[in-house]
Image (cartoon, rainbow, N blue to C red):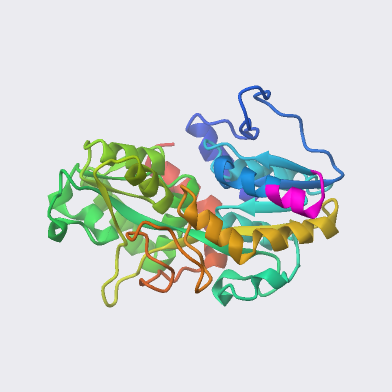
Amino acid sequence: MRHPLLAVLFVLAACGREPYPEAAPAAAQEPATPPAAPATGLTVYVALDEQWSRPLLDRFARELGVDLVQRHDSEAAKTVGLVSAILEERSRPRCSVFWNNELAHTVRLAQEGLLAPYDSPAAKEIPAPWRDPQGRWHGFAARARVLIVNTEQLPDPTTWPTSYRDLVDPKWQGRCAVARPLTGTTLTHFTALRKALGDAEFDRFFAAMQANDVKFLASNGATMRETRDGKLAWAFTDTDDYHVAKTKGFPVACVFPDQGEGQLGTMLIPNSVALIADGPDQQNGKRLIDKILAAETEALLAAAAGAQIPLRPGVPGPQDPAILAAGKFRAMAWDVEWTAQNLARCSQEFGRKFGL
C-alpha cells in the first residue's frame, strides 16, 4: 500500500515536477546532483532557503568544532524532497537534524515515529503552541500568510483587501491570485482553512474562487511577481516574498488579513527543527539544535532578507514596519496535528479540482 505521506508526491509528478529532487547546488561549481549524505557524521537536512540558512550553519559548525554535512532542498521541491528522503531512509537514517520551514510536514514525521524527543534548553522561551509536548520538534522564526498589494493599482489604502474572503468578492474578479494549494505554505494554509471552515463551507469557498476567476499560480513567488509588476491588484503570498519585492523597490504593500473581531486571523507558519530518530551523531545533533533554536538565530533570520518573524517576545523583528511582530496581530489558531495528518489527502483533493 502506498505510504500516505508520499501521496502528495504524485500530485507533484502530475504537475510536471520531479518527485524526488536532489538538493539545490550550493554554488555553480558544485555538481547538479550532489552525492547522498554519509550514514555517519553530523548531517542536517535544510528546507529554509540556502542563502539564509547556510551562512548560519557554517558558523554553528565552526563554533561547535564539528564537520557538518548540509543537504539543502530545492525551491521546486517545496520541502517534500527532504521529507520523502527521511521517509525512505527510515531503516538507515542518514540525517541527524531536520531544519524545516513547513511545520506541518515536520509534525507528520513526528506522527510517523521518525523524530526523537529532545527538550532543548534553548527553546524555553518559545510559546507553548510552537513546541511539541513530547519534545520531538520546536518551532521558531515564522512567515505569515499575507496579502501583497500593488500600490500603483490601489493607491488608496481604504480600498485594499483585508480578508481571505476578498478572493471571492466580485469586485476583484480576475484581479487577484493565490498559489495552487498543492505544495508549500499554500497547501498548509488551505488544509488548515478546510478544518476551520468545515468541508461543505470550504468547498463552496473554493468553487466561488474559481467562479471569480482567481488566478491560481505556480507558487507564492509567482503571485508576488505578478502583483509587483502590476498584472494583478493583489495576491496571497508569504512575508518573505513580499519583503523581497519591497526591498527591491517595487510599489507593494503588505496587509495582515482577517484582523477584525470574529475573523480567523493571519496564519503564522514557523520554521521547525527536530532530531531524527536513530540518526547519526545524536549528541552533536542536540548541540546543533540548541544553536538553531537560540534567540540570536531568530534575530539574525529577522534581519536577513527573508524577514522571518521571531516567536519569542522581546527578540527584534524585521525592520520593515509592515511585518508585524508576533503578538501584535490576531493570529489564526490552526490545528497543527490535524493539518499534518491531512496534508497529503488535501493535496490530492485540491489537485482534482484542477483536473490533475
Residue 62 visible in rendering: yes
Vertical position of residue 48 compared to residue 140: above or below: above
Vertical side of 255 occupied by 180: above or below: above
Determine the main secondary structure of the stretch shown in magenta: helix
Residue 152 in picture, x, y percent from top left: 16, 43
Q: Residue at x 71, y 41 (%)?
A: 70
Residue at point 69%, 40% (across, down)? 71
Q: Residue at x 55, y 53 (%)?
A: 102
Q: Residue at x 36, y 56 (%)?
A: 320
In the rendered image, residue 183, in percent from the top left (x then y), is placed at: 49, 45
Instruction: Count the numbered circles shown.
Output: 0
Image quarter (top left, top right, bottom left or bottom right) of the C terminus? top left
Residue 129 horizontal side relative to residue 99, left or right: left
Residue 165 figure quarter:
bottom left
Task: Give percent across and percent down for residue 7.
Answer: 59, 45
Describe residue 156's horizontal placement relative to residue 318 as left or right. left
Q: Position of residue 249 (x, y in %)?
A: 30, 41
What are the residue bounds of the magenta stretch?
A: 59-67
Q: Is residue 215 magenta?
A: no
Q: Is residue 114 visible?
A: no
